[in-house]
Image: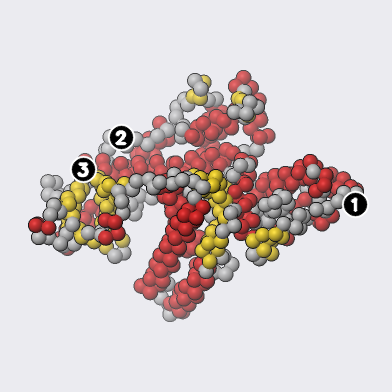
Amino acid sequence: MQHYANPAKVNLVLDLFRAYPKAAQQIAAVQWRCFFDTGAFKRNLPIHIASPLSARFKQTCQYQVVGMLNSFIANRANDFKDAVMGIPDAILAAFDARHSERAWLGSHGRPVSYTRVALLYLGKYRAWYRAAPAMKGLPIPAEILRLARSIMRGVFARHRRPSMGQIQMLLDEKVARIEATRSMAEHTPFAYWVKLATLRPGKPISIPIHANVHYESVAGERMACVQINLGERGLSIGFVKDVPVTPYAPRMEVLGVDVGLRYLVATSAGDLMGRGLLDRLIVWDRQITALAANRQKQGLRVRSRRYDTLVARVRSFLKNEINRVLNRLLAVRQPDEIVIESLDFRSPDLSRRMNRLVQNFGRTVFRQALAAKAEQFGFTATEVNAAYTSQSCAKCGYVDKKNRRAERFTCRHCSHTAHADINAAMNIRNRRSVATMASRWVSQSAILEALVRQFLERCTQRPYSRPGSGILSNPYFLGFAGWRTESSMENSEAPLL
């Protein structure tokens, strides 16, 4: 939304921006202490901080801070679940043995690890730091609670806490109220006015706002909150709408998606979308690299108005392309669940500078766009470990580094051929149902071992698909010496696929 605040009003808003982040940092510190003491953030916690903000402004700030922290913890809960699912059964068996009286039966009627179930329970309800969490009326053993907290320390070590130093202001109607122009008879070109409290008690200001065609065209109810941002171009003001859930009828159950730069999206259904993305990025990469090198040669700092403009173009292009491709994908396939790999937007064809930009920005935008569309349409988005998805055959499961040559995949065992990215997408789709390989915390070596064992078990169950002699030279199979000896003796007697 375009605002028309005069310089005096802008200065009063800037005064708020000098006080608001400092208050947010103090509130966040108190909330983190509350979280580790009680196991939860509290929106209505009494606020005792030194700040020129009014009590109402502090409360609004605390609501925003708690919302950000809860969102952060929700993501860390997913990381915790991945870590728990990646713990080998042998490690959990020692804990289970000490609590054998609490043996747990799964939905299939077979015993499952009580320790794993208890850890998942703690993660589901975010009860890692509660005083005495209980499951099914029984307190969770202290050593399992200590294990959960140890896992969470590892999770927190991988992710920095949200920084409030650059927080923008999301204000509710206690301190910022939107007033719509009632009629054209008021003789004003402005569609709205924002009545905003300031650091001067009892002296709010009114900021005129021009209508935004795109905002008005979006269906939904305007919410009673105002977003005020401070960026390089000064102040910007935005309104928020509660957009209704779009009717969505899934036409397929699960769709695997491989994300990259040569093709932004390849799917398990055979789609290749987002062609030409890498070519455009290479052009911008050359321009940015040449500009940076020239400025460094002159002894100037790299950033300049032209440099920032080029970077902004790259970001804008990535954001538009990601949203365009996702919209197209959902319109064509309409899956009930989308399974993606751990996102990696790097390419050897790009410079280190461009790879860093594309990786950091592209990954964030893709995740945010996918999460927003999942919420809008009601489908599920699942992220799995991508290790060896590009080297494994989606048909027989054979894993070999030589299976893939550029964009072509040809299995050296069953001769299955496919586009390499589509084959990877099929593996990503299949991996979601294998808990021991889906977790992003499982090591590559553990996944490789699981893939090799799974393939060999299939060969044992199907004598007609006995591995060929070429597999004996595959370094991935070197750790299975017993099988290699037996296979070399029987290989000449069994027909090969």
Q: Residues within 10 Å of mark 2 (few under 14, many from 20)?
A: some
Work out which quarter of the rendered image holds the N terminus and state it: bottom left
Between discs 2 and 3, the one toward the N terminus? 2
Q: Position of residue 201 (x, y in %)?
A: 14, 46
**Residue at 64% in and 64% down:** 407
Q: At x 54% / y 37%, what residue is drawn?
A: 150
Q: Earlier in the sequence, mark 1 or mark 3?
A: 3
**Label 2 close to label 3 by CB (< 8 Å):** no
Q: First in sequence, mark 2 or 1: give its number.
A: 2
Q: Is residue 182 left or right of 165 when viewed as pictured?
A: left
Foreground residue, 226 or 263? 263
Q: Position of residue 445 (x, y in %)?
A: 68, 48
- Judging by the rendered image, the residue that carries numbered circle 3 is 174
Position in image of residue 325 (x %, y %): 47, 59
Q: Amino acid at mark 2?
A: Leu
Residue lying at 64% horizontally and 61% vertically, measured from the top left: 419
Of 104 and 163, which appears nearest the observer? 104
Mark number displayed over residue 365: none
State the residue position of label 2.
45
Quarter of the image holding residue 186? bottom left
| Cα gap from disc 2 to disc 3, whole angstroms | 17 Å
How busy is the neighbourhood of tag 1: few (under 14 within 10 Å), some, or many (20 plus)? few
In this rendering, the label closer to the viewer, 2 or 3: 3
**Residue picked out by circle 1:** 492
Describe the element under mark 1 as helix, strand or loop.
loop
Dot 2: element: loop
Would residue 23 be visible to someone looking at this image? Answer: no
- In the rendered structure, which amino acid carries the disc numbered 1? Ser
Relative to 312, say whether 21 is above or below: above
Taking the image as shown, residue 494 lies to the left or right of residue 341, namely right
| Mark 1 touches mark 3? (CB < 8 Å) | no
